[in-house]
Image (cartoon, grey):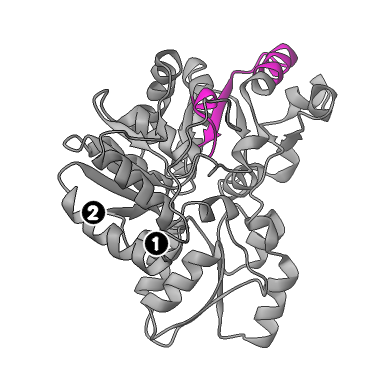
Amino acid sequence: MLDLFGKEEVHRPIISQEELSDEEVLVELRKIKEELKDEVVVLGHHYQQDDVIEFADYKGDSLKLAQDAALLKDKPYIIFCGVHFMAETADMLTGDDQHVILPDMQAGCSMADMANREEIDKAWDFMRKSTNDKIIPITYINCAATLKSFVGENDGTICTSSNAQNIIKWAFDQGQKLLFFPDQHLGRNTCHDLGISLDEMVVYNPNMLNGGLTSEQIDKAKVILWYGFCSVHQGFTATQVEQIKKEKPDTTVIVHPECNFEVVQAAHDNGSTAYIINKIKEAPAGSKFAVGTEINLVNRLANDFPDKEITSLSPYQCLCTTMYRVRPRWLLASFRAIKENKPINIIKVDDKTKEYSLKALNKMLELSK
């Protein structure tokens, strides 16, 4: 049976409620992690919940975890507490004798699912027929390995929210136009910050004939944005920002650039997950922040910096539900399977996809030094 990523489904061992309570799971996890410390390293994305992040040897955003994965040479097993595309990236950046494991194979990304290779190939063909300008494709790291391979095959590269400006500057040194996918908002916000006007950007929607664009629009545009978006960051609105400014004028609104253009423009500041963390960390005691990003990170920041007032910009729970799928119970199942020498949920990218994806990933890492 194939899972939602088109891969053979690997069933995790059942750790039932009757077998172990949640607290017993944590107790056994601490024990087995210590027991297997010479074999296993755990990577944890910032959006994971605290009871998972507790077990991460390395914590970070997509860029940092990609950089960490590239340096891990001595551990045969890497458990990635994140989502599917992140585990794929880790597999491509680690050795052939290492195994990357995703605790829950259903931990995906709705944004990544908004673009596939067939759609991108079709769009690329139309765009190249519509202009004589050289188009440089850039994919946000939040995508399948097949799309990372596409940009590698077509002399583009990959970006994260941390390095998007540098990557896009590089792209315009290589060509006259940019195809940015799958997140329209990161592309639009970053390009606007670099001085590109909204009039020079168009949105390609794969659900419409030719993306809903004419050849003339493609030829005229400087930036072609894919229609994709992050469902979590869509939960923040400019109205929320204005309300905070009105009711709490001493509060700094800081948001992630995956938020829409109106939110980013209304906020006091915006930046990647790492940028938001550092801004709050470096702020003086007594500072107040309303943060527009995933709720687990916001709550962790509030706990880590009790001398500051840190709240979510949204009154609603902006939760990454796919990250939420990685639970301590499934992390323990991964450890148990390794201990039994029967590892499960191994993420493996085929050699052809890996070749060009690595070309793009290595270019990104080179440009991010």
Residue at 23 percent of width and 38 percent of height: 71
Quarter of the image with the N terminus is top right
Is residue 369 something that shows in the picture? no
Chain-order first, disc 2 or disc 1: 1
- Quarter holding residue 92: top left
Q: Is residue 22 above or below residue 78?
A: below
Residue 90, x across and y down, in percent: 36, 35
Image-based side of 246 in relation to 274, left or right: right
Along the viewing direction, whichever of 208 and 285 lies nearer the viewer: 208
Dot 2 falls on a residue whose secondary structure is helix
Where residue 113 sits, quadrant-wise, is top right
The type of residue carrying mark 1 is Leu
Question: Please, is residue 303 above or below residue 191 in the view?
Answer: below
Alpha-carbon span between mark 2 and mark 1: 15 Å
Is 279 situated above or below 187?
A: below
Viewer-closest of 72 and 331: 331
Q: From the viewer's perspective, is residue 185 above or below residue 136?
A: below
Decide if residue 188 is in sight here. yes
Q: Are marks 2 and 1 in contact (CB under 8 Å)?
A: no
What residue is pinned by disc 2? Answer: 32
Rendered image quadrant of residue 205:
top right
Residue type, label 2:
Ile
- Give the labeled residue for mark 1: 20
Magenta span: 121-148
**Image coords of residue 25 (percent x, y):** 36, 61
Percent across and percent down for residue 229 are 66, 45
Residue drawn 69% across the image and 61% down it: 235
